[in-house]
Image (tube, grey):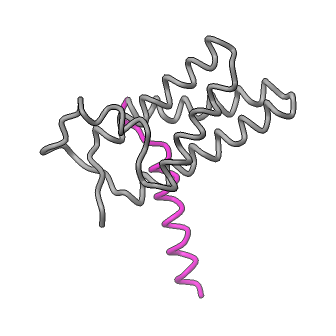
Amino acid sequence: MKEIPEPYVKANQTGIVLFVILTAVFNQPYILLVLWLIQVLGLLTGKNGFVLLAKPFLKVEGAPTQAQELQRFNNTLAVIFLTLSLLSFLAQLPVAGYVFAAMLFLAAFAALCGYCIGCTVYFQYKQFKARRKLRH
């Protein structure tokens, strides 16, 4: 199983938190569009923009790692929440747009503090698939 150094994961989470804060402070949903592009490109290429920016400053030798599959799942969730947020803003539903952005912010902030909500969802999803497979 391929692993990703934890400092890279934290760099992405920090980028998400900062971009959502900037969106709220400046009341500019277009900032979320930039964040969405960074996350989508990261999913498509495996090279996250925040990691590329922070890489020269990060010490990864001997750092703990996380499973790439899990991080891909978490980034997919981030893209889903960003997509829902942006679509809400396009539909002239700014409250919904900020709610979806806030949900992403809270998940990324909680992960920075040590609790990965996406990891919990991923674990439950895997458990559900395993139980379902046993039934068939």
Locate residue 121, reporting x and y percent.
Answer: 52, 52
Please identify the residue farthest to the right as the structure is shown. 92
Query: Residue 48 at x, y = what percent?
Result: 43, 44
- Furthest-left residue in this view: 62
Is residue 1 shown left or right of residue 20?
left
The residue under the point 42% across, 56% down is 70
Side of 93 where 35 appears, left or right: left
Which residue is at the far bottom? Answer: 136
Q: How many marks?
A: 0
Asked whether residue 124 is drawn in magenta, I would say yes
For the C terminus, the quadrant is bottom right
* In front of the other: 12 or 128: 12
Front residue of 135/45: it is 45
The part of the image, by quadrant, that contains residue 115 is top left
Quarter that holds the N terminus = bottom left
Q: Is residue 106 left or right of residue 9?
A: right
Q: Residue at x 72, y 41 (%)?
A: 84
Residue under the point 71% across and 35% down: 85
Q: Residue 98's quadrant in the figure?
A: top right
Q: Is residue 55 above or below residue 120?
A: above
The span picked out in magenta is 113-136
Magenta-drawn stretch contains 114: yes
Q: What kind of secondary structure does the magenta stretch mostly adopt?
A: helix
Q: Measured from the top left, where is residue 120 in percent x and y?
A: 47, 50
Give the percent coordinates (x, y) of residue 101. 64, 30
Left or right: 98 with respect to 58? right
